[in-house]
Image (cartoon, rainbow, N blue to C red):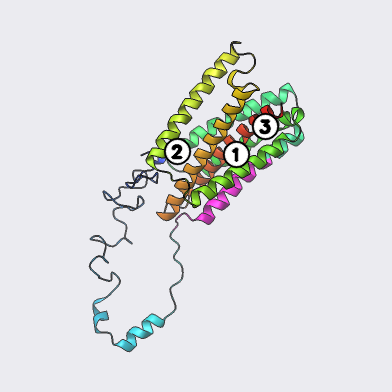
C-alpha cells in the first residue's frame, strides 16, 4: 500500500499488518513477509537462517564458550557494555533537527518578505512566482529517489516568501489573522500528535483509503471552483465565499491537513522503528512542512471568513 502523502508516495511505503509503513522496493529486497521493510539481503550484520533465538541459540556464542567456568561467565556478565554503534539510521532527533531547519527556513523567508515587500500588485506577482518555484522544487524532490536537502531548503525559502506576502495581505484586511492562523496550526499539530500517540487515531489501510478519497474529491472540487471563479461564473468566490458554505469548506480543508499530519507521524514512526537510512529524516521534515503549510493557509482562509 503506497502512502497517500505525495511527499512519501515514491518510497512505496507498505507493510503486511494493515498499517501504512515504509516499503521494501526502494530500500532493497526484503524477505517475503518480513516485518522489517529495511531488511536487505546480504546484510553482513543480519543473522543467517532466520531467527537464531527461535531454537534458544545464541548467535554470538563461540565454540569455546561452552567450556567456560561459572567464574569466567560471571566476569563476562560484569564487564561494562559496549559503546553505541553508529549505524547511520534515522532517529527521532534527526527528524526534529531537520524539521526545525526546514520550518526555520520557511519562517526566515516569510519574515523577510513581510518586512521588505509592501502590499501591492507587484508583491502579489512576486508571491505567485515564488509559489510556482516552490511547487516545482517540491515536485522535483517528489520524483527523486533520495532526499536532496538543497531542494527541500529551496522549497522552504520560496514557500516562505509566498507565505510572507499572503500573510501580510491578510493582516491588512483582518488584523491579527496570521497570528491566529499560526496558533490554530500549532493547536492542530499538537492535537493530532496527542491523538496519534494515544492511539485515538490509527493509520490503517482503511483509514488511508477513506481519507485519500475525500482528499482527491476535495482537490478536484477546488479545481472546478477555481475555473468557475476565473471565468466569472462564481464572482463571489464560489465555494470559498464568505458564509456557511465557505466555513464548511474551510473546516474540511483543515481536517484534511490534519489527516496528512497523521500519515506523516506514521511514516516517521515506522522509519525510526525499522531503521530507515538517516537521510530519510529530510524527507520526514519535508512532509511535515508541506502538511503544516497546508493547514496554515486553510486556517487563514477560515479565519478571514469567520471575521467577516
Left or right: 200 as drawn, with respect to 40 = right
Residue annotated with mark 1:
156
Residue 263, position as x, y percentages in the image? 47, 42
Q: In this picture, is 115 found above or below 199?
A: above
Give neighbour class at mark 1: few <14, some 14-19, many 20+ (Cα, 10 Å): many
Give the structural element (helix, strand or loop) at label 2: loop
Tag of residue 89 = none
Quarter of the picture holding the C terminus: top right
Q: Residues within 10 Å of mark 2 (few under 14, many from 20)?
A: few
Disc 2 and disc 1: Cα gap in Å? Answer: 17 Å
Q: Determine whether 168 is above or below 190 in the image.
A: above
Is residue 252 highlighted in magenta?
no
**x and y percent of residue 264 in the render?**
49, 44
Label 1 element class: helix
**Of pointers 3 and 2, the one earlier in the residue sequence:** 2
Q: Quadrant of residue 203?
A: top left
Please determine whether, in this image, residue 121 is positioned above or below residue 88.
above
Badge 3 vs badge 1, beta-carbon distance below 8 Å: no
Q: Which residues are magenta?
A: 88-108
Viewer-side residue, 76 vs 201: 201
- Mark 2 or mark 1: which comes first in sequence? 2
Question: From mark 3 to mark 1, how far is it between C-alphas?
Answer: 24 Å
Q: Which mark is residue 144?
A: 2
Amino acid at each position: 500500500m503506497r502512502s497517500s502523502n505525495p511527499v512519501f508516495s515514491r518510497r512505496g511505503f507498505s507493510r503486511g499488518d494493515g498499517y501504512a509503513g515504509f516499503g521494501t522496493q526502494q530500500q532493497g529486497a526484503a524477505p517475503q513477509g518480513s516485518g522489517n521493510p529495511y531488511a536487505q539481503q546480504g546484510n553482513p550484520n543480519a543473522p543467517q537462517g532466520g531467527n537464531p533465538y527461535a531454537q534458544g541459540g545464541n548467535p554470538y556464542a563461540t565454540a569455546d564458550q561452552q567450556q567456560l567456568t561459572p567464574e569466567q561467565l560471571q566476569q563476562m556478565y560484569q564487564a561494562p557494555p559496549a559503546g553505541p554503534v553508529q549505524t547511520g539510521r534515522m532517529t527521532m532527533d534527526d527528524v526534529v533537527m531537520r524539521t526545525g531547519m526546514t520550518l526555520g527556513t520557511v519562517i526566515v523567508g516569510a519574515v523577510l518578505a513581510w518586512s521588505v515587500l509592501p502590499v501591492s500588485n507587484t508583491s502579489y506577482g512576486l508571491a505567485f512566482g515564488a509559489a510556482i518555484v516552490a511547487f516545482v522544487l517540491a515536485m522535483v524532490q517528489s520524483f527523486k529517489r533520495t532526499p536532496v536537502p538543497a531542494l527541500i531548503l529551496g522549497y522552504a525559502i520560496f514557500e516562505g516568501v509566498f507565505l510572507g506576502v499572503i500573510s501580510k495581505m491578510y493582516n491588512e484586511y483582518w488584523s491579527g489573522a496570521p497570528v491566529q492562523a499560526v496558533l490554530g496550526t500549532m493547536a492542530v499539530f499538537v492535537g493530532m500528535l496527542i491523538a496519534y500517540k494515544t492511539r485515538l487515531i490509527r493509520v490503517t489501510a482503511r483509514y488511508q483509503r477513506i481519507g485519500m478519497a475525500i482528499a482527491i474529491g476535495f482537490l478536484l472540487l477546488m479545481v472546478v471552483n477555481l475555473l468557475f471563479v476565473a471565468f466569472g461564473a462564481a464572482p463571489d468566490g464560489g465555494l470559498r465565499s464568505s458564509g456557511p458554505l465557505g466555513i464548511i469548506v474551510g473546516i474540511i480543508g483543515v481536517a484534511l491537513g490534519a489527516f496528512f499530519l497523521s500519515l506523516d507521524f506514521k511514516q516517521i514512526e515506522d522509519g525510526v522503528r525499522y531503521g530507515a537510512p538517516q537521510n530519510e529524516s529530510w524527507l520526514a521534515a519535508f512532509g511535515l512542512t508541506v502538511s503544516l503549510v497546508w493547514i496554515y493557509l486553510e486556517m487563514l482562509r477560515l479565519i478571514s471568513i469567520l471575521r467577516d
